[in-house]
Image (tube, rainbow, N blue to C red):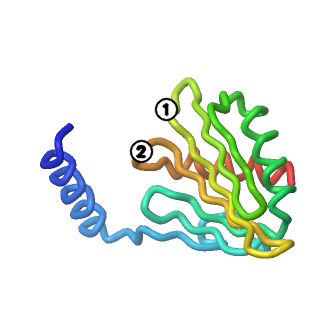
Amino acid sequence: MNYKQLLLLSVLGLSLLVNTGCPPVIIGAAAGVGVGAGTVAYVGGELKSTEKVSLDRAWGATQTAMGDLGFAITDRHKDVFNAELNARGVEVKKIRIALKKISDNSTELKIRVGVFGDEAKSQQILQAIKQRL
């Protein structure tokens, strides 16, 4: 796909989103997740959630959840402030989960499924992670 085709698809996708009348952002309880756990938002194909746990605990739960869901982890790395896990599944081409330490007891998770995002699968992955926290 060349640059012009990508630009055209982006413009068309944006115009469809704007013209549907549906808000592109879902936050907190309106999304049916994250109640009492901080904020949750789905923006631009990426699900963002802030959890009240340490980076280490969120990292462990993320790795366990991905294994339990049957995704093959293709790459992972972690330092004191950030962590990232990449995985693949049978139907899902690429999954990227990025974790960022906000404080000692607060971690931001960002989940992207595929190139353009998949909200339903992102929500399923987030729920699996939360069950293991």
Residue 69, compared with residue 37, is above or below; it is above
Residue furthest to the top in view is 90
Q: Secondary structure at mark 1?
A: loop
Residue at position x 82%, y 48% in the image: 61
Residue 35, compared with residue 46, is above or below; it is below
Estimate the spatial distance between the alpha carbons at disc 1 and disc 2, rounded to whole Å. 9 Å
Residue 84 shows which numbered tag? Answer: none
Label 1 sits on residue:
93
Q: Earlier in the sequence, mark 1 or mark 2?
A: 1
Residue 17, compared with residue 120, is above or below; it is below
Residue at position x 18%, y 54% in the image: 7
Determine the image quadrant of residue 34: bottom right
Q: Amino acid at mark 2?
A: Val
Percent from the top left, x then y, of residue 110? 61, 58
Residue furthest to the left in view is 4
Percent from the top left, x then y, of residue 118? 49, 47
Label 2 sits on residue:
115
Percent from the top left, x then y, of residue 120? 55, 48
Determine the image quadrant of residue 39: bottom right
- Discs 1, 2 touching: Cβ within 8 Å: yes
Closest to the observer: 40 or 52? 52
Where the C terminus falls, by quadrant?
A: bottom right
Residue at position x 66%, y 44% in the image: 85
The number of numbered badges drawn on the structure is 2
Q: Amino acid at mark 1?
A: Lys
- Along the horizontal axis of the image, is 114 left or right of 73? left
Q: Residues within 10 Å of mark 2 (few under 14, many from 20)?
A: few
Percent from the top left, x then y, of residue 75? 64, 36
Residue at position x 47%, y 70% in the image: 25
Residue 89, compared with residue 81, is above or below; it is above
